[in-house]
Amino acid sequence: MKINLLAIGKTDNRNLQYLIDEYTKRIGFYISLNFEIIPDIKNSKNLSESQQKQVEGNEILKRIGKGDTIILLDEKGKMYTSIEFSEFIQKKLNSGLKTLVFVIGGPYGFSKEVYARANGKVSLSSMTFSHQMVRLLFIEQLYRAFTILRNEPYHHR
């Protein structure tokens, strides 16, 4: 299995980007991870929230294959502990999936079409984070999941 992570817009903060790159590199020891940034929409200030979600949604859907399993990072998604999330990842690994795609949307969330295509939703917290912070939090949890599965000392039980 390989994991694709799609995110709208680049990370502006160098410190966040450094940490994202560090955890992305670490995950590479466990699984093939492709982290793709979908460029910000040009002239988004001229678009309504729903128009922006629609344009972003079209860009997301262009990058998803027919057989891909799609999990949206969404505030209304299922919340997991780190252990539960590692078990979720293990089930996906065992299921024979070819590609698991996690998607981080823009500031207004996802279009109806993206929600319709999704196979599930995961929430990182009841709190709201910027979509740039979500990248770091998620990628760290993905790394943590693999260390848990390998019984490595990164996660303390």
Image (cartoon, rainbow, N blue to C red):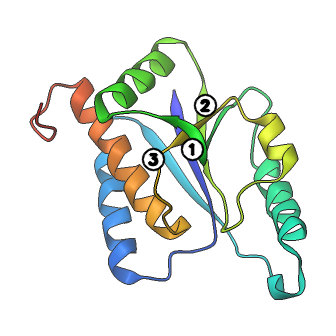
Identified at 14% across, 41% down, the residue is 154
Identified at 31% across, 67% down, the residue is 19
Separation of marks 3 and 2 at Cα, in angstroms: 21 Å
Q: Residue beneath label 2, please?
A: 99
Residue type marked 1 = Asn
Give the vertical position of 6 relative to 101 (above or below): below
Residue type marked 3 = Leu
Residue 22 image offset from top left, x and y in percent: 29, 61
Give the vertical position of 6 relative to 108 (above or below): above
The disc, 1 or 3, on the residue closer to the chain's N-terminal end is 1
Tag in front: 3 or 2: 3
Q: Which mark is residue 124?
A: 3
Q: Residue beneath label 1, please?
A: 4
Separation of marks 2 and 1 at Cα, in angstroms: 7 Å
Taking 56 as reference, is 50 left or right?
right
Tag in front: 1 or 3: 3
- Depth order, front residue of 69/115: 115
| Disc 3 to disc 2: CB gap under 8 Å | no
| Disc 2 to disc 1: CB gap under 8 Å | yes
Observer able to see residue 122: yes
Residue type marked 2 = Thr
Residue 56 image offset from top left, x and y in percent: 79, 63
Which quadrant holds residue 149? top left
